[in-house]
Amino acid sequence: MKSLLGRLYREQNGQALYLVAASLVAILGMAALSIDIGFALHAQRELQANTDAAASAGGAAMPNPATTSVYGVVTEYSGSKAYSALYNVHPDLNITNVSVSFTCLSTTTYPGYSLPPCAAAASYPSCGVTASNPAGGCNAIKVVETATEPTFFGKILGFKSLTVTATSVASASGGGAIPYHIMLVLDTTNSMGSGTDTGCVTGSSSSYTPEQCAQFGVQTLLSELAPCAVGVSSCGSSAAVDEVGVMSFPGICSDSNSGVTTANCPTLSSAAPLTNTTANPTYAPNDYACPAVAPPIAQYNNDPEYLVVGFGNDYRLSDNSALNWSSDVVKTDGAGTNNCGMPTPGGEGTFYAGAIVAAQTYLTNNHASHVQDIMILLSDGNASASTTQMGGNVKQAVTGSQIAGMNGNLFSATAECTQAVNAAAWARGVKQSDGTSTQIYSISYGSETSGCTSGESVPSIGGNPANTPCSTMAGISSTPLSQYFFSVPQTVNGNTSTVCKGAVPITQLSQVFTTIGSMLETARLIPLNVAGTWVVATS
């Protein structure tokens, strides 16, 4: 025995075994701690996402007479089972507390946040009356959520649970949103007036044409936008917030020899001045007349007049009023009321690029500093205008070096889908003096999944086949597609069109315009480092 112990004492083989055994406890302890920390970080990310959603939902409900409790809206989106949340509930997240508070942030102190005016409402506590806020009220909401997460291995070291906290601040929704210049570009080709879309859910009738359904959707958008600031009883001379204009394609005559005409447009010389960004009723009936009269259509290279109504904010007379049916913008998109609404004169096939160029040109010519330019293009076509329909010899203002795919300074009767995508890329790439660029929403309303002209080079976009109307409409939109690209089916003559891939998953046209309006006008998250006197809500 003494000899054996001596040999073990003097033996050096296997010393690592002792070291591993001695350090194994520390190694396993650190591994266990890292697992608990990993779960805590995961819980923190989930909690922050829930808090952001809750703050955004609460801000969207401020002020809203239909909302009985902003606090209730916040808790519904908080993800907390303890507060009977309806949304964002994660089984692994134990949210123990949701705190909601409000404040009035100065629009002059934080001019870059585009805050709405402070407003009082019964659904949340009134902020204090101050020199800068004489009427009291709030325009921002803060949500703080706390979660307690049990540990797995930390219990061995005495840590039975970890507490994580997330904070989010959001502005109220309303007329204080970023001002917008919005140019609507609507397809009025013959197919938009053919048949009835039984999938159009507006009203109780199923006898609406696709064009009428589109105009109902625009009316929804006009009801969502802010013509002037919140709290102003009448916009009157108040500063405009969101201004809206309308263009249509095919374009109407921009010149004639004898004034107003409903006959064929004369062929203009190549030296004719471009007038496609200035509405000129001298040469064609106004599309906003009631009842509407089909105007004469111009060939796409014959200087068509795309502009129907220039920018204006009289579509509603105050932020909380109904649509103003004396407004030219409302009458232009006034399907279903007093025989108003743009007609679908037909006579030309679908060609997007010219209208996109005209819309961006108008946006640039009328850009105002710190106003975001928006283009919303809706079409059901496949960009296959014939050589005759592409006729004319008036050169475009934008050169071929600026828009790839153009045949010199004239648009080509081939590769029409490619020209549309390239024109949209040019429009999105125009930088204004304040550093902003146009955002383009593309609405594919029953677009085919096949059919473009020859010579196309549109890649597969959003999973749609290359050189198809679906990829074209996806390529026209800004990215990400999940925000700017919509695809809505038409149900005409019992046939429902295919929905393009990669689009926002909404299949009702009115809901598309509601969603776009919400994107433009809803509450926005703002930085946490804002100074305010926060009033805590208790219920």
Image: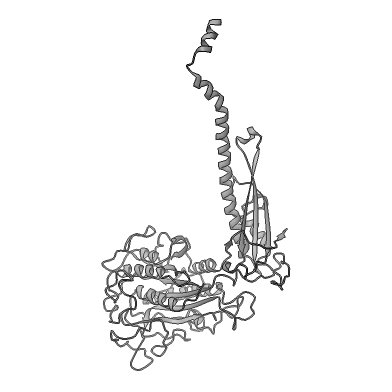
Please state the horizontal and vertical placement of residue 220, each as a whole percent of the image: 53, 73
Percent position (x, y) of residue 94? 63, 46
Image location (x, y in percent) of residue 32: 57, 35
Q: How is the image coloured?
A: one colour
Say which residue appears at 39% left-offset and 73% top-offset. Answer: 356
Q: Is 348 placed above or below 476 here?
A: below
Q: Nearer the viewer, residue 67 or 216?
A: 67
Residue furthest to the bottom: 258
* Residue closest to the eye, 197 or 330: 330
- From where the camera sits, is residue 461 visible? yes
Q: Is residue 208 visible?
A: no
Figure label count: 0
Q: Quadrant of the C terminus?
A: bottom right
Q: Quadrant of the N terminus?
A: top right
Percent of width and height locating residue 528? 61, 58
Instruction: State which quadrant residue 263 falls in.
Output: bottom left
Residue at screen point 58% across, 57% down: 53
Q: Is residue 170 above or below residue 260?
A: above
In this view, the residue in front, 174 or 158, is 158
